[in-house]
Amino acid sequence: MYITRYQINKIKKKLLKFLNNIERNKKKTKFYKLAATICRSNSIKININKNILNNIYFITDNINLHWAETDGQNIYLNNIKNYNYNLLYYTIWHELIHGMILRKDNSELSEYLEHKFMLQFDKQLI
């Protein structure tokens, strides 16, 4: 599939609805409840960074062959991978979740726990 800005904007719109729902309903959402379970504490924060969706870039990574990467401010999609719409959606969503769940001392979860969370939240995120 040839990735277009239209497809990325469509995905951004969908993910913004997801983020707005978490903002509005906070502790009532499945996202928050599962995050609290993974952290083993109700004292967690959900860091909603909507700006990251405006910073989606392409990289060529033919060494590690990752689908995508994030540094917390940007999402980098590997342009040598063959995406379809569904795969692109879940890849961007996966990268969006990295760094979203914070413990009460503002520390992020380990990548292992983030992936465990994603697997339990929606298997397609892994």
Image (tube, rainbow, N blue to C red):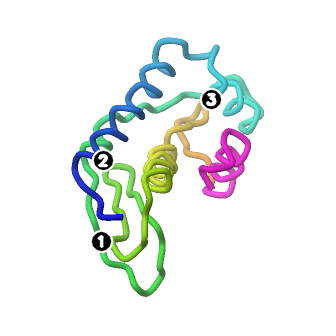
Please name the residue that numbered disc 2 is placed on: 7
Q: What stretch is highlighted in magenta?
A: 111-126
Q: In terms of sequence position, does the residue under pointer 3 or pointer 1 come before the other?
A: 3
- Residue 69: percent from the left, percent from the top? 42, 63
Quarter of the C terminus within the rendering: bottom right
In the rendered image of this protein, does residue 110 appear above or below residue 13?
A: below
Q: Which residue is drawn at 29% across and 71% down?
A: 59
Proximity of marks 1 and 2: CB atoms separated by less than 8 Å: no
Q: Which residue does the image show at 67% across and 33% down from the upper left?
A: 35
Q: From the viewer's perspective, is the residue at label 3 or at label 2 nearer?
A: 2
The mark total stands at 3
Q: Is mark 1 on a helix, strand or loop?
A: strand
Is disc 3 surrounded by few (<14), some (14 to 19) or many (20+) residues within 10 Å? some
Residue 52, image quadrant: top left
What residue is disc 3 on? Answer: 31
The numbered mark at residue 59 is 1
Residue drawn 45% across and 48% down?
Answer: 89
Secondary structure type for disc 3: helix
The mark that comes first in sequence, 1 or 2, is 2
Type of amino acid under label 3: Phe
